[in-house]
């Protein structure tokens, strides 16, 4: 028994673009004799697109029109109308042109991917979704050791450190299989991030041993990131600038887990010139490195980890006793406003007010809080409470401000750089996608 | 007003209404108790450590365990007394003391009376069922569901007649549950009903109250719906669990299946005021559908 949500995941990466549709089952987990607790109880992938090369204009700018055609064709093939999609996420990843690409993709797909689909870009969220999509987060629940998941794509490697199903931290390095491309033994592209570490440039002929050398160099960056070797200036040089904080290597022994296109090249030895890039050499270098010394995990559908994460794991549910009156949904791109004076949000724009946990949440304290909030006379109230009091607070606030729209939710953990999309309720809970946006700031 | 100003303003508000946090048991360390540490010298007037303050979900006392971390992870999911270790064939002292302390708390919750002035302090009309004391209450459930002529007359003369919603607080099997939750829950229910324009009658407190006492209140006041907040039979996990029983068109002899219940109202379950807001919404639905209990679920399923 339960309600089904149709979720779409679209991953527009440096190299590949993929799309999946998943069905999320939402059911009440509580008995009939207590207040409801809705949760996502099942996730099934309904449709997987082929792995496409990302349509590009030039070397790293996404061709929005071509992308739109591709997505339209996939919706048709899957037999899904865009109005049927309830939730999901579009993930835009990229090596150097993340911001420009995010704008282009959002413009090309705006209004297309359903009413409530979060368009997101940013390495932190990407890391989390890849780790979830690869199954590393679920796996960590059965382990007594932390898991370090690496999603190694074309332009970047997303790192996620996980313990007992909880994300401890995320990071991102500019290590990927498409940083250098070649055709018939000649180099056609060298990423700017490689220029400091290699003399190779476009037009040069390249030998097997030169490629292998580069693979070993890049895998040594990942060894340092995993804390297997002491870190040098190299780790700093390859750190992705948009990550919210610098990466700190795990302090203890971890189990490594891999996904992404390069992970497929760890599994089996491919012809070094097969894809015209350094994916195969990087995969083989990783296999021979300290990273694969102990037990490590390689997902079955490694190249699809991020898109499965975007489709099946981006949506979460708010608490089930919440309040909404007069607020039309969905709400999109609501920045979190932390109630501590710190807020990354832009001026003059509305946001969702994030309250901390109250130490003595009795009704008198709640009424005092509601009265003070009402005195601010905001045009509408969007609030996320720090504990299970959202319905009581929302109700009190609405009683004080009967004509002011009010939405009050709980059960969601927001930090100062979060943006929030809130959809129409499922059962008594709201589907929510928490995201980070790199552009606009 | 821009975001930074709003954020700062709300921070200011929170500072005013939240006193310094006093986290219960914050000084408790979830480690394996060391016998040496327990053999402290106590002098007259000292208090022994409070065994009931220990967080059982974090207390793992098996010695030389192969996978203590894995066991602790399992323990977080259940209040059951697992991994308590042993001393020969017996419980450890801490386990035994804690078990007896929890059992005593449960018994106290049943046998302690809700204070004499509780009803007056919270603006409730005080009534008593036909039971004369706790012993009679426990042995004669039938007497806990009805009133003598004196109490019936008091209800008839003092309470508003035929309200849409009649709210009742009853001690039931846990006075501790009522003291901890009833006032906040009641206040939230009343605000929720006010928001929806639903009128309530004279709020009542019933001593020695079974859920069925609400049916007798229905007979007398002629209310359309009764909501009884009652202390639940305490267990070894919590002695403060309260339930809200909601009955549409209550009358003596109504079937138990006609009741809608929201149980597990306590700090670790559904918090009292959040439960109150939920109950208010539920009452609204029941009044609209004109049915409670199993009938309401059938209605929702069709």
Image (tube, helix red, strand yellow):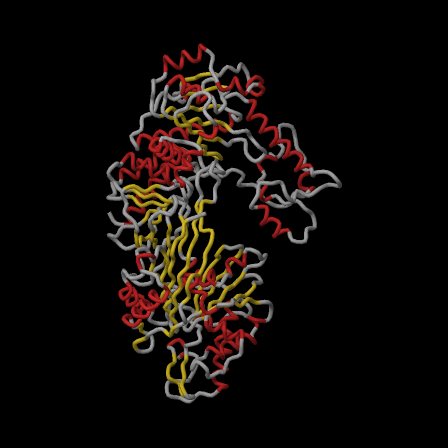
Q: Position of residue B211 (x, y in %)?
A: 48, 25
Relative horizontal placement of residue B218, taking residue B144 as reference (left or right)? left
Q: Position of residue B167 (x, y in %)?
A: 39, 25
Residue B216 position by quadrant: top left
On screen, A367 above or below A9?
Answer: above
Q: Is residue A356 visible?
A: no
Residue A128 position by quadrant: bottom left
Q: Nearer the viewer, residue B222 or A107?
A: B222
On screen, A101 above or below B18?
Answer: below
Relative horizontal placement of residue A120, taking residue A274 as reference (left or right)? left
Q: Residue at x 31, y 58 (%)?
A: A114
Q: Nearer the viewer, residue A102 or A76?
A: A76
Q: Nearer the viewer, residue A112 or A219?
A: A112
The residue furthest right is: B88
Q: Residue at x 29, y 43 (%)?
A: A381
Q: Position of residue B61 (x, y in %)?
A: 66, 44
Q: Residue at x 33, y 67 (%)?
A: A71
Q: Residue at x 71, y 42 (%)?
A: B86
């Amino acid at each position: 028994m339960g309600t089904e949500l149709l979720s779409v995941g679209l991953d527009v990466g440096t190299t590949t673009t993929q799309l999946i549709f998943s069905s999320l089952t939402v059911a009440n987990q509580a008995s009939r004799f207590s207040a409801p607790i809705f949760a996502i109880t099942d996730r099934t992938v309904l449709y997987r697109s082929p792995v496409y090369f990302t349509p590009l204009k030039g070397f790293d700018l996404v061709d929005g029109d071509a992308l739109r055609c591709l997505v339209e064709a996939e919706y048709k093939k899957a037999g899904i109308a865009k109005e049927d999609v309830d939730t999901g996420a579009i993930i835009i990843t990229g090596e150097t042109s993340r911001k420009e690409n995010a704008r282009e993709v959002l413009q090309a797909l705006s209004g297309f991917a359903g009413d409530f689909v979060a368009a997101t870009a940013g390495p932190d969220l990407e890391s989390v979704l890849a780790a979830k999509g690869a199954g590393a987060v679920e796996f960590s629940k059965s382990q007594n050791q932390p898991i370090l998941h690496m999603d190694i794509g074309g332009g970047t490697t997303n790192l996620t450190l996980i313990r007992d199903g909880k994300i401890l931290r995320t990071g991102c390095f500019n290590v990927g299989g498409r940083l250098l491309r070649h055709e018939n033994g000649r180099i056609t592209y060298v990423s700017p991030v490689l220029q400091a570490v290699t003399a190779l440039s476009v037009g040069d002929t390249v030998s097997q041993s030169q490629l292998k050398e580069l693979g070993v160099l890049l895998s040594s960056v990942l060894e340092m990131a995993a804390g297997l070797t002491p870190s040098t200036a190299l780790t700093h040089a390859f750190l992705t600038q948009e990550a919210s904080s610098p990466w700190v290597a795990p302090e203890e022994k971890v189990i490594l887990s891999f996904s992404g296109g390069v992970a497929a090249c760890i599994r089996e030895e491919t012809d070094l010139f097969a894809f015209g890039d350094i994916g195969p050499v990087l995969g083989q270098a990783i296999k021979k490195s300290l990273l694969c010394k102990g037990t490590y995990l390689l997902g079955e559908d490694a190249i699809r980890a991020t898109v499965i994460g975007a489709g099946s794991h981006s949506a979460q549910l708010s608490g089930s006793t919440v309040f909404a009156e007069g607020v039309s949904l969905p709400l999109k791109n609501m920045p979190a406003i932390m109630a501590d004076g710190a807020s990354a949000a832009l001026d003059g724009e509305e946001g969702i007010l994030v309250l901390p946990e109250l130490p003595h949440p009795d009704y008198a304290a709640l009424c005092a809080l509601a009265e003070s909030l009402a005195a601010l006379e905001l045009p509408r109230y969007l609030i996320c409470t720090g504990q299970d009091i959202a319905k009581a607070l929302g109700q009190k606030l609405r009683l004080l401000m009967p004509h002011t729209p009010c939405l009050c939710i709980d059960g969601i953990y927001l930090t100062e750089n979060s943006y929030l999309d809130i959809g129409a309720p499922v059962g008594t809970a709201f589907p929510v996608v928490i995201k980070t946006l790199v552009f606009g700031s | 007003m821009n975001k930074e100003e709003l954020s700062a303003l709300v921070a200011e508000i929170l500072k005013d209404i939240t006193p310094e946090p006093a986290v219960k048991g914050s000084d408790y360390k979830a480690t394996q108790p060391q016998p040496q540490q327990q053999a402290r010298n106590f002098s007259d007037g000292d208090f022994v450590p409070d065994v009931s303050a220990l967080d059982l979900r974090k207390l793992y006392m098996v010695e030389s365990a192969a996978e203590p971390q894995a066991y602790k992870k399992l323990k977080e999911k259940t209040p059951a007394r697992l991994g308590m270790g042993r001393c020969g064939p017996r419980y450890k002292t801490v386990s035994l003391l804690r078990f007896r302390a929890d059992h005593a708390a449960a018994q106290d919750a049943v046998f302690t009376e809700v204070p004499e002035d509780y009803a007056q302090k919270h603006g409730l009309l005080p009534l008593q069922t036909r039971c004369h004391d706790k012993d009679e209450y426990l042995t004669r459930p039938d007497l806990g569901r009805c009133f003598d002529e004196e109490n019936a007359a008091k209800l008839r003369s003092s309470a508003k007649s035929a309200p849409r919603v009649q709210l009742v607080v009853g001690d039931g099997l846990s006075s501790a549950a009522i003291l901890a939750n009833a006032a906040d829950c009641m206040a939230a229910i009343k605000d929720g009903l006010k928001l929806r324009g639903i009128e309530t009658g004279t709020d009542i407190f019933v001593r020695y109250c079974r859920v069925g006492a609400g049916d007798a209140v229905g007979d007398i006041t002629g209310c359309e719906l009764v909501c009884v907040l009652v202390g639940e039979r305490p267990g070894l996990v919590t002695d403060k669990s309260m339930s809200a029983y909601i009955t549409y068109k209550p009358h003596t002899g109504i079937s138990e299946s006609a009741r809608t219940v929201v149980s597990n109202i306590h700090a670790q379950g559904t918090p009292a005021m959040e439960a109150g807001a939920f109950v208010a919404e539920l009452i609204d639905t029941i009044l609209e559908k004109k049915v409670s209990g199993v009938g309401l679920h059938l209605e929702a399923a069709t």
